[in-house]
Image: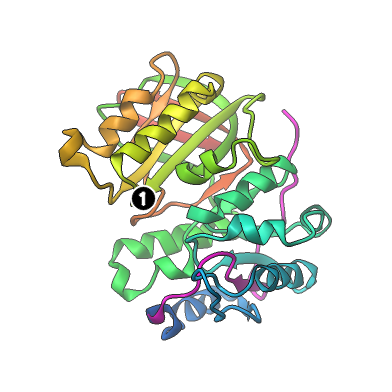
Amino acid sequence: MKAYLRPEYLKRGDCVAVVALASALSEASRQTLYWKELLESWGLRVKLGRHLYDRAPGDFAGRDEDRAADLTEMLLDPEVKAIISFRGGYGSMRTLRAMDQNLFASHPKWLVGFSDITVFHAFLQSRGIESILGAMPSTIGPEAGPDARVSEASLRKALFGEIRSYRTAPHAYNVAGSARGRLVGGNLSLVVSCLGTPWQNPLTEDSILFIEDVDERMYNLDRMLLTLQQGGAFDRAKAVIAGQFTDTSGEDEWQRKAVDLVHEYMPADKPVLFGFDCGHDHPNYSLYLGREVSLDVTPDGGYLKYL
């Protein structure tokens, strides 16, 4: 399997940048620095994007070119070792379009985020660079509940290179088996949005596909799963990991839960792991995307190991 570029793990004293790559910060987020104090408590220095608090029509965190400028500045800054997106929402694809995409390979750094940031993960995979699917400042804080502390701890471990594997509990929809491949994917909506773009992952090499989503209607979830199925994604993947599917509307009308609908589209002839706590709820465990992993699914649960 082709070796991906892996940015250097962080150590105490390193500098991390926090930028807004998509939607604008909420009013509540503008009133707290919990996330900055948390990063500093890990021994990190924090640099903020110049346009972090901007707002532009469409509820973007500033104009496309300004969001791109913040990301470009942090990529070029030799002090910055990792870049964390404050939140997702919508706008990552527009930000990526507005910048020099060659900078990521010449200045590799950990890029962190989930949800809409899946676009950047897909792009980085297309360029052979690892990234971190993990909690963002907008999703943590005292009001997020005690399980948010687990998400925070997982992000710290990911940044410092301390995650080796995950174990999950048994799930009724699991399909037993073993597979090995590159861990790819992210938010289902954005995986589908990347189809037909240069960042679409054709899954032509051995891959383990992770998907999750939030705040979708059942018919839209069905459409996206059907699109991937008919496009052969589930056939080409060596295994599938289903993360959290939260706040789905229309379940009563469809007379099933979102997880039931996801299960209907999963292959029966390869490992499928359900109940992996990663997505838009807590705990939200961080994942190294673009890295080779092994997955074992047994009656006792799942075991995901980084190789």
Report the side of 250 relative to 104 (left or right): left
Report the side of 137 relative to 13 (left or right): left
Q: Nearer the viewer, residue 201 or 113?
A: 201
For residue 140, above or below residue 162: below
Residue at screen point 73% across, 72% down: 69
Please tell me in which quadrant of the rendered image residue 185 appears: top right
Report the side of 90 relative to 82 (left or right): left
> Where does the C terminus fall, quadrant-wise?
top right
For residue 127, above or below residue 120: above
Residue 42 placement (x, y as % from top left): 53, 73
How many tags in the picture? 1
Amino acid type at image mark 1: Val
Residue at screen point 28% across, 36% down: 259
The reply to whether residue 104 is visible in this rendering is: yes
**Residue 67 among those drawn in magenta:** no
Which residue, as the protein is rendered here, is positioned at the far top?
269
Report the side of 107 relative to 195 (left or right): right
Circle 1 sits on which residue? 214
Residue 49 placement (x, y as % from top left): 64, 77
> Where does the N terminus fall, quadrant-wise?
top right
**Residue 20 among those drawn in magenta:** yes
Which residue, as the protein is rendered here, is positioned at the far bottom?
31
Magenta region? 1-27
For label 1, the SS is strand
